[in-house]
Every structure is written in C-alpha cells, then in structure tokens.
Amino acid sequence: SVTLAVLTSGGDSQGMNAAVRSVVRVSIQLGANVYFVKEGYYGLIEGNDYITKANWYDVSFTLNLGGTIIGTKRCMEFMTKEGRMKATKNMISLGIGNLVVIGGDGSLSGANIFREEWPSYIDELLRKGEIDEETSKKFDHLNLVGIVGSIDNDFSGTDMTIGADTALHRILEAIDSIVSTAFSHQRTFIMEVMGRNCGYLAVKSALMCEADYLFIREWPQKLDWPDKLCEHVQRARKYGKRLNIIIVSEGAVDLNGTAITSEMVKNVLVDRLQQDARVTVLGHVQRGGSPSAFDRILASRMGAHAVLCLLEATKTSEPKVVCLNANTIEHQSLMKCVKSTFEIANAIEQKDFDKALK
Ligand code: F6P
C-alpha cells in the first residue's frame, strides 16, 4: 500500500491542524499508511522520533486548535544537499515515497527542489551500497503535493490560503474593541497588520472596519501622503467623527520604496494636527486562536484532495498544489504557481501594477 508523510513548515497558521487531520484520516480510510513529520523539515532530517506513524485518533479534537500540533521550525540544514540527503534516507527507511507539505511559498519551493534532486540522492545511496537495486527502483521518484498554509493569502493560484480568514477575524475583533475606547477619547488609532509584502489582510480589514486610511505595499503612497492623510482625517473630524482608524500593512512603502511605518503615520498626526494618536501593533495575535469555520472546512477539503492527488500520482506526475478556485477544490502545477507568486511580487516591487494584476 501507499505510504505518505505530512509536515507543516514555515510560519504556522490557523487551520493547519484541520489539514493534517484530513490528510491522516483520508489516507487511513483509503488504506494508505501515513506518518507525521514533527517540526517540519528539521524532523525530516533528524528522523527517529520525529517521524512517527499516525493513527486515526491521534488527530481527534484538533480541528478547533490553532497553530500546528506537529510543530514547525525554520531549518537551514534543509537548504543544503547534505540535509536533503539525510531526509531522503530517513524517508525511504520507513518506505515513504509521498509527501504532503503544508506551508507558505518558501516551504513549497524548498519541497520542489527536494523532489527534483531526489533521484540523484537515490543513485548515490545505491552507489554507496546503502540501498539495494530493488529499493532504488521502488523509490526512484518522490510524489509531492503542497497545501498553502499562511495568514498572508499571498499565493498565486488559490483564492484563499489556510489561516487568512481566521487572521481577518482576529484583526476585526481587535479593531472593534479599539473603536469603543477611541470613540470615548476622540483618539486616532493606527493599527499595524501582518501580511509580509501582501496587502490582503490590510485591505479586507480596512473595508470591514470603515477605516479612514490604508497603507499597503501594492499601492505605494505619493510622497505628499502626509498632506493627504491630514486632509482626510481633518475633514472627518470637522463633520463630527470622534475617532479615526488607520490601517498600516507591515510592508507598506511610498513611491521611493521607503517604508511607511505606523510610528511615522502617528508622528505625522501628532505633529501636524496635535491629534491624540496611538499605535497598536497586532503582531502574532493575528496568527493565534481557533480557526474559523471557513478555515476548518477549507483545510479539511484541501487535505482530502492532497491525498487523492498522491494516490493517483504516477512516475511522470509533476508536483501539485491544492487550490481553491471559485469555491471548488482543485490542483495546479506547484511550480507554475510558485513561479507566478514570485513574478507578481517582483512586478509589485517594480511598480508594474498592470503586470501584477494580470
Ligand atoms: O507569513 C506569515 C507572517 O505572519 C507574516 O505575516 C509576517 O510578516 C511573518 O510571518 C512574521 O514572521 P515570524 O513569525 O517569523 O516573526
């Protein structure tokens, strides 16, 4: 029967457990063996207790948990051939030739390098006499499927990544709480949200909390942004608004590419308008807590689809990434999506927004 392993890598996100649970249960239901790899690629390299057989009940009551129960860790060693060779050895010693990687774009492109080099590691193991001819034939290629777990929603090919919806809930809960105190004191709050270089969380939360102003990387501000900001905020106050909410995405920049930080925004309002302005950096709160219903369902569907992809994979199958497209779960070429994710990011850096939109 087919043997596969599942790992989570990179920054955690709410809903990763639902994806792991679904991979485990669908595999068992369909007669496959499934292993947990603990602490991401680090565990794949360490082997031993880091790679353990999963059973149906190991994943009971994990749907409601944020983070990842199998852990995630940054791993420099996986960037080296030596590290990837160790990972190959550990996998084949347990009969694992199929891998589900749940992570962001960096983790998924790392997985693809591993898959591409896999045959060379098998050849080397055969040459050194560490495996026999039969094993080398059985494990001559690695089947790989990616699932995108990231609060940033920054991956091309899927409408949503696992965790982005929950992070948005966390942000809105926080802003709703701030609004009452801001109203009482007639204050302005500058809310800094995550997203790395992607403005998804910032744009959606700005729309949903009626923010007065928004700073994101994809829309670099003209250099006179302080004038515009003050004009806007002042107008709102003139017509009786008792508070202002300003959203700053952590990657926001101006047209020169200079970072616009929440402290800079606050200082403009304090210095020019003598406003009572405060900064709230939401930070890792956005990555915490229970996954939303949407993320639990999305992750469960994606996990199931990943297993089906692996069970159907042949020697010539290219690696896949599981995507949500107009509410349908489907798969696409992993490398095509990784490439297009990087191309969009580059186009934004070069301020070629038409290209980025296309
Ligand atoms: O990619 C998820 C994310 O939370 C980003 O939004 C943020 O920029 C980054 O990870 C923070 O990374 P770390 O958890 O390593 O501080």
Image: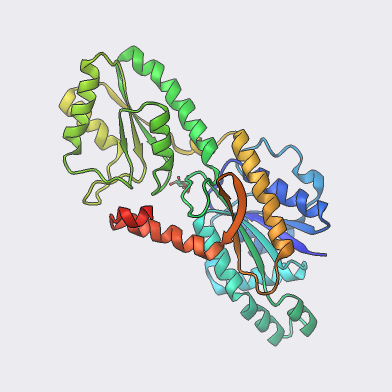
Of 119 and 82, the residue lying toward us: 119
Question: From this viewpoint, which residue is outermost toward the bottom?
Answer: 127
Seen in the picture, residue 208 relative to 149 is either above or below; the reply is above
Residue 213 appears in view: yes
Q: Looking at the image, can residue 75 be seen? A: no
For residue 341, above or below residue 56: below
- Residue at 22% x, 27% y is 232
Residue found 44% across the figure and 22% down from its top:
176
Q: How many marks?
A: 0
Nearest to the observer: residue 98 or residue 48? 98
Quadrant location of the N terminus in the rendered image: bottom right
x 69%, y 87%: residue: 127
- Where is residue 83, by image quadrant? bottom right
Q: Where is residue 215 shown, x and y percent of the image?
A: 31, 39
Q: Residue 48 appears at what percent x and percent y?
A: 73, 62
Q: Quadrant of residue 57?
A: top right
- In the rendered image, the vertical position of residue 279 relative to residue 127, given as above or below: above
Q: Quadrant of the C terminus?
A: bottom left
The image shows residue 189 at horizontal and vertical percentages of 33, 26
Relative placement, left or right, of 198 versus 71 is: left
Who is closer to the viewer here, 36 or 230? 230
- Whether 258 is drawn above or below 175: the answer is below
Q: How is the image coloured?
A: rainbow
Residue occupying the point 55% across, 70% down = 113
Left or right of 248 on screen, residue 168: right
Tell me residue 86's x, y (percent).
65, 71
